[in-house]
């Protein structure tokens, strides 16, 4: 029997400041570990105010994780210690595996009006791959396949598979799926999910129903929950849905379209030791990582 995933929890993304002073909204992060395993963090850095983004994320280290940056407007310049550099703009993706250690910077430039839009997802690496060789994949928008279903639903397949179409990013350790989905008014989107995988959706435009029965839901507002039985149970921009287990997700609309990121991955189930931009399994591994960064041996030389 095929079961449709129900809503486990809904979180409202929260304002925070990162990097050299970038204003963004965090859908989930450090304090939610290990709830979203294998994912660690999802940040939304959309803004029409240039001062919110231009200071960017100057040179900093990463180890033990993957960072996935998806731009939907404006431009982001990237450079790293392995010699990779480039610019991603609307519709482009930067998938960076930090592995044993990389030092990089990401500097948002915005569009002609100074507006910037995009998302950064952090995915954890298992103990067996935390010290793998770093790698970088910069994907331009035309390289990312788009599936258009009969009812007009459009799905950009960054990673994973939709209707037999495989995504642009492949061979990832945590077997992730990363989709950008737009469901038109009066339509329904159903997508299979693997049992036991963590599945979340983050709404970025419009409004939609993420529960087949359209039940009212409980908001998690960073520790204080409330239940609003009078609220029409649709989700809107900035809402993050964490689903219960099941074989598929179902999203429907009425008079408005909805656009959301659908993200899933296989949980790692290991201890997480996290400080700043480095995520390991133990505090001792963290200590070694920062010691190496301070003495200049953080980036491994490889033949």
Image (tube, rainbow, N blue to C red):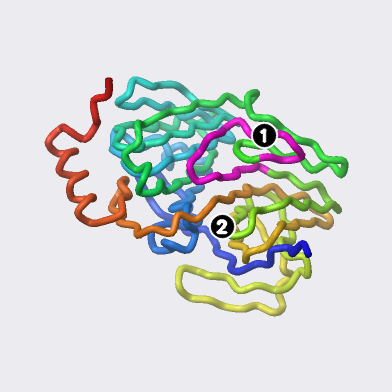
Q: Position of residue 159 (x, y in %)?
A: 60, 38
Location of the C terminus (image quadrant): top left
Location of the N terminus (image quadrant): bottom right
Q: Is residue 164 magenta?
A: yes
Q: Is residue 50 magenta?
A: no
Farthest left residue?
Answer: 295
The residue nearer to you, when weighing 12 against 166, is 166
Q: SS class of the residue under badge 2?
A: strand
Please give the name of the residue rendered at 15% of the width and 43% of the height, measured from the top-left corner.
291
Q: For the magenta stretch, what is the residue range?
A: 161-180
Residue 146, quarter of the rendered image: top right
Residue 84, quarter of the rendered image: top left
Q: Earlier in the sequence, mark 1 or mark 2?
A: 1
Q: Is residue 181 left or right of residue 92?
A: right
The residue nearer to you, when weighing 273 against 107, is 273
Q: Is residue 194 left or right of residue 212?
A: left
**Could you tell me if residue 20 is visible in this image?**
no
Q: Is residue 146 left or right of residue 159?
A: right
Residue 19, quarter of the rendered image: top left
Classed neighbour count for the residue bearing mark 2: other residues with Cα under 10 Å, few (<14), some (14–19), many (≥20): many
Q: Number of marks in the image? A: 2
Report the Cα–Cα distance between label 1 and label 2: 20 Å
Q: SS class of the residue under badge 1?
A: strand
Identify residue for label 2.
Answer: 198
Classed neighbour count for the residue bearing mark 1: other residues with Cα under 10 Å, few (<14), some (14–19), many (≥20): some
Identify residue for label 1.
Answer: 166
Q: Position of residue 299 (x, y in %)?
A: 24, 31
Q: Position of residue 149 (x, y in %)?
A: 82, 40
């Amino acid at each position: 029997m095929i079961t449709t995933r129900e809503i486990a929890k809904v979180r409202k993304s929260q304002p925070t400041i990162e990097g050299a002073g970038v204003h963004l909204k965090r859908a989930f992060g450090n304090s939610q570990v290990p709830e979203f395993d294998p994912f660690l963090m999802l940040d939304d850095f959309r803004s029409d105010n240039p001062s919110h983004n231009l200071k960017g994320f100057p040179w900093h280290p990463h180890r033990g994780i993957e960072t996935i940056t998806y731009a939907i407007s404006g431009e982001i310049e990237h450079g790293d210690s392995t010699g990779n550099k480039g610019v991603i703009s609307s519709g482009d993706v930067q998938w960076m595996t930090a592995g044993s250690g990389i030092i990089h910077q990401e500097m948002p430039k915005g569009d002609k009006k100074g507006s910037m839009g995009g998302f950064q997802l952090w995915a954890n690496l298992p103990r067996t791959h935390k010290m793998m060789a770093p790698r970088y994949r910069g994907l331009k928008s035309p390289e990312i396949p788009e599936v258009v279903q009969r009812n007009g639903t459009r799905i950009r397949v960054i990673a994973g598979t939709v209707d037999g179409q495989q995504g642009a990013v492949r061979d990832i350790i945590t077997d992730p799926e990363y989709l950008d989905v737009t469901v038109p008014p009066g339509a329904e989107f159903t997508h299979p999910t693997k049992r036991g995988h963590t599945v979340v959706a983050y709404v970025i435009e419009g409004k939609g129903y993420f529960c087949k029965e359209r039940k009212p839901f409980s908001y998690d507002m960073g520790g204080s929950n409330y239940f609003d039985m009078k609220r029409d149970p649709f989700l809107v921009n900035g809402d993050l849905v964490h689903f219960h287990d099941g074989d598929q997700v179902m999203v429907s609309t009425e008079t408005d379209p909805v656009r959301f990121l659908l993200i899933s991955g296989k949980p790692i189930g290991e201890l997480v030791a996290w400080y700043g931009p480095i995520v390991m399994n133990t505090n001792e591994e963290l200590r070694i990582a920062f010691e190496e960064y301070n003495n200049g041996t953080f980036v491994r030389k490889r033949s």
